[in-house]
Amino acid sequence: MIKVTARQRIWRLLSKPFVFFSILMALKIYLARFVIFDGGHVWMPLATGIPSVWVAFCLVELLFHKRKLGAYLVVNLILTTVYFAVIMYYKYFGVIVTYHALQQVGQVTEVKSSVFSLLHPYFLLIYVDIVVLFILLLVSRNVRAWGRSLAVREPRSATAAVGVLSLAMCVASIYPYKDGMNEILQAQNMGILNYEAYVAFGASKDETIDSSKVTQEKIREIKGNEAKANPAYWGAAKGKNVIVIQLEAFQNFLIGLKLDGQEITPNLNRLASESLYFPHFYQQVGQGNTSDAEFVVNTSFYIPQHGAASQVYADKELPSMPKTFAENGYETATFHTNDVIFWNRKELYKALGFGKYYDKTFFGEEDPVMFGASDEVLYDKTAAKLGSMQQSGKPFYVQVISMSGHHPFNLPERKYKMKLPDKYEDTLVGDYIRAQNYADFALGQFIDKLKANGVWDNSLVVIYGDHQGLPVYSLTKYEKRLMREIYGREYEAPDMLNIPLIIKLPGQTEGKVLEQTGGQSDLFPTIANLAGISLADHIHFGQDILNETHNVLPQRYYLPSGSFINDKAVFVPGLDFKDGVVYPFGGGEAGKDLVTEEQYKNALELISMSDSYVESLPERK
């Protein structure tokens, strides 16, 4: 009788694919946990993560005993890719990616530089076992022999029992948190794979609202606003051109910022000092980023729960700013140096009702920066076109989309307009600041050209950022330290979401700082008021921030569901309102007295109302 040693028993156990691949997946679970949740409880990842892995492995044992190793390798690859996608998506958006993002796969080739910039080398460790096993299967007879030896059927009753028990553990992990609002906490408590299954089969968190009950009076009631009989600034730009400039990834902290005595945005600083400047203005975009900003600004609706607005809502007859201005005698157009097909903009622009669009075919490919011609080319050709449009005698409404400041901010050296302090070199923060310094330089040229051709003095000019450029979750510890030096405190969610808004009235020479909170959905009603155009019969979820001093801005995507911004802080829920977190403006002391549960409920209701209303709109013919 051959005596089996303890070492041999351990080796036999480890050589079983169920055990071997479980150990590999446990390591990947911990890697994802470390990157996304910054560590946390030691045993919780195994308690919530391994049962969902075992459900898949038990199916392999029951269905593929003859090709067991191949099946395990495929399942391992699929689960690994899920974890990898979750890690990469979180590093940019700060959310847990789900199957809904598959519709955006076609956009990845356009933003591949952004994707690769977020790829820390140690993330690739998650695929090391797959590469090593593949190589060993090619070169090692022993490994291939091991693979063939696995073609045995384990006791079906025991395998089924483990599978059922694992499934029960998955349900037990999901159930207590199924009604939670915060998706990140849900994924942390459920386990990532369990959360993915919950999202695929669970019900929507949004309340279903009868679209016929969505009225402007109801929206004003929820927001606590009243219709103004004689609103301030009414018609201040009546009959004038309207130029809306959307700055790529431009955050508010850049306004007035100096590094080693250098102004980062001298042109915007000067413009802000001569205009209406709103330092408490915030993004309201989601998965579509720039295209979402175009949608929100031009409709005053909120982004959809899943997907980019340009893809989800492009088939709708959208009430919009271009249509409204066209009905009041304006020409309308939009300018962007990228291909109009990107983010389905061709269809979005039809839905928004722009009279014309100017894209890559108009601007060409000269002087490329990021995905198209540089901002200098954008502004040069746009200024000339606006000059010719003004000669028609009709006012125009146009939107101009900059792009040279796009993530990952790899500005060509020929475009450098400043010298960074040494400590900022080779950092995302430094690259961002230098790219936005160039964006400001190009904008300054645009302003000069519009002044020279007579368009500037005859126009209302609105400038804002489309979305954040420096996600809190993308920064290294060193980069966070740099941001701490800039702010004089920790860089937090309110700072990340804070974008500038500058409104230059025709003939205005003296500036004014307005401290009220605003968001991108507020631009349509605000601009309409300045142009003297009534929106009395037009559903809009934003408000005229020149005439309202209180606001509630629902947030989606960059923050968990149920998050909102009010006049004092950003609120992020936990499982519900009671265990939420408050981030005060300016990094002050957090306190629940800065937000109310009523505001939380109102933000959720506004989101649901917007969803119901837009989905009820007729399809575009």
Image (cartoon, helix red, strand yellow):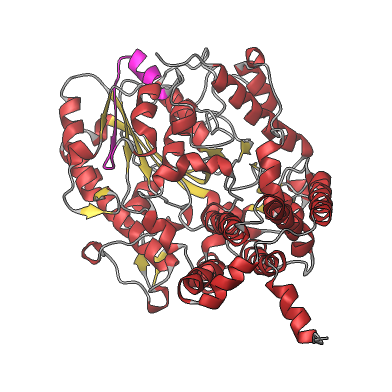
Which residue is at the far front? 1
Closer to the camera, 11 or 180? Answer: 11
Quadrant showing the N terminus: bottom right
Residue 250 shown left or right of residue 189 in the figure: left
Q: Nearer the viewer, residue 513 or 25?
A: 25
In the rendered image, the vertical position of residue 279 relative to residue 525, given as above or below: below
User: In the figure, 360 relative to 34: above or below?
Assistant: above
Residue 508 to residue 525: above or below: below
Q: Where does the C terminus fall, quadrant-wise?
A: top left
- Measuring from the top left, give residue 33's x and y in whole percent: 67, 64
Residue 447 picture location, percent across and down: 25, 44
Q: Position of residue 318 (x, y in %)?
A: 46, 20
Q: Nearer the viewer, residue 370 or 26?
A: 26
As for residue 436 lying within the magenta part, the answer is: no
Q: Is residue 227 left or right of residue 181?
A: left
In the rendered view, does 424 fall on the left or right side of 195? Answer: left
Q: Which residues are magenta?
A: 321-339
Q: Nearer the viewer, residue 130 or 31?
A: 130
Whether residue 333 is visible, yes or no, is: yes
Q: Position of residue 548 (x, y in %)?
A: 58, 31
| Residue 32 found in image quarter | bottom right
**Residue drawn at 48 percent across, 51 percent down:** 468
**Quadrant location of residue 551?**
top right
